[in-house]
Image (tube, rainbow, N blue to C red):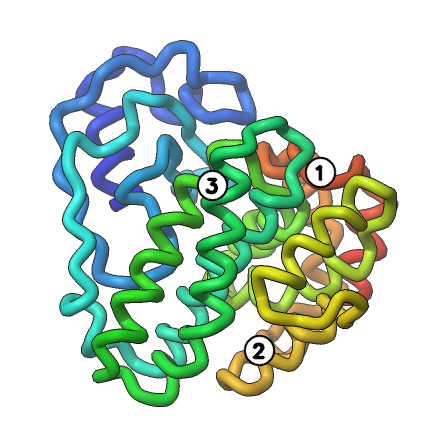
Amino acid sequence: MDLAKAMGLMVSSERPFEQLGATLRGGKHIGKIPPLLAIATTAGTGSEVSSGAVVILDNGRKETFVSAHLVPAAAICDPELTLGLPPALTAATGMDAMTHCIEAVLSPVVNPPAEAIGLDGAERAGRWLERAVKDGSDREARWQMMMASFEGALAFSKGLGAVHGLSHALGRVKELKLHHGTLNAVILPHALAMLEGAEVAEKFVRLRRALGLGANADLPGYIADLNARIGLPPSLSAMGVTEAHWPGAREYAVSDLATMTNATPFEGAQYDALFARAL
């Protein structure tokens, strides 16, 4: 779906494609693209209802493109199309949706309707993802996860955070070709553990409630345990990432669009710590 959006940009803009990226604040140059019909075949990205597209450029950068013109003219979200999705991809794309919901809720951007949608999406993912992984033919679980994915993209209209900043940076490492949702899943518990502050604490209470956890439950621990139960890697190093990959990725994480809306300010030192924790 993101590739289709990119093609629409290429045929409708006279500017070089890379100049339309969010890093260069190129969204102001994006106009209407040809009508796009988006059909979701995983329950994760939510690109069928989002104003964004993420594309790896020829220069290796994993660039985000954002404009209201990138919202598809129509979308088909049919959970029947996800019935054949293997367990590993069900888990990874499902945690992509979960991360969208959680980071959107934690974003400091004020948008109560989007935040409420994010909480509902997180609740659905928390209740139904493990069941969808265990039995891919479970139509109820597939329906619920498709809705969680849909809601995650609606919610992140208020922004994402450092999980996506680091995920985008490591996703550009050509020799590894790492899966975005899996990266999000591995990084998420560590990013949550680094968050502090009264406003974040209040949102943690709401997230715990949505996920059916106790008032003082360990939210990062819950995510890590969920990852383990659905068969996702325990660390970045288990995915092939090494310390040698960090110097080349650090700049991209700091400058990523998602970093701007992290729950708390995130700069180089914070990313150094997040990478070390997740590795």
Residue in front for this viewpoint, 220 or 140:
140
Mark 3–mark 1 Cα distance, whole angstroms, equals: 23 Å
Residue in front for this viewpoint, 64 or 49:
49
Residue 151, compared with residue 131, is above or below; it is: above
Q: Please provide percent x and percent y for residue 174.
A: 49, 57
Mark 2–mark 1 Cα distance, whole angstroms, equals: 26 Å
Q: Are marks 2 and 3 in contact (CB under 8 Å)?
A: no
Quadrant housing residue 109: top right
Q: Amino acid at mark 3?
A: Ala
Mark 2–mark 3 Cα distance, whole angstroms, equals: 22 Å
Quadrant housing residue 215: bottom right
Which mark is first along the chain, 3 or 2? Answer: 3
Residue in front for this viewpoint, 28 or 147:
147
Q: Which residue is mark 3?
A: 155
Circle 2 or circle 3, nearest the eye = 3
Residue for point 39% across, 83% down: 131
Residue 223, compared with residue 96, is above or below; it is: below
Q: Secondary structure at mark 3?
A: helix
Q: Is residue 230 left or right of residue 259?
A: left
Which mark is first along the chain, 1 or 3? Answer: 3
Dot 2 crowding, Cα within 10 Å, few <14, some 14–19, many 20+: many
Circle 3 or circle 1, nearest the eye = 3
Circle number at residue 254: 1
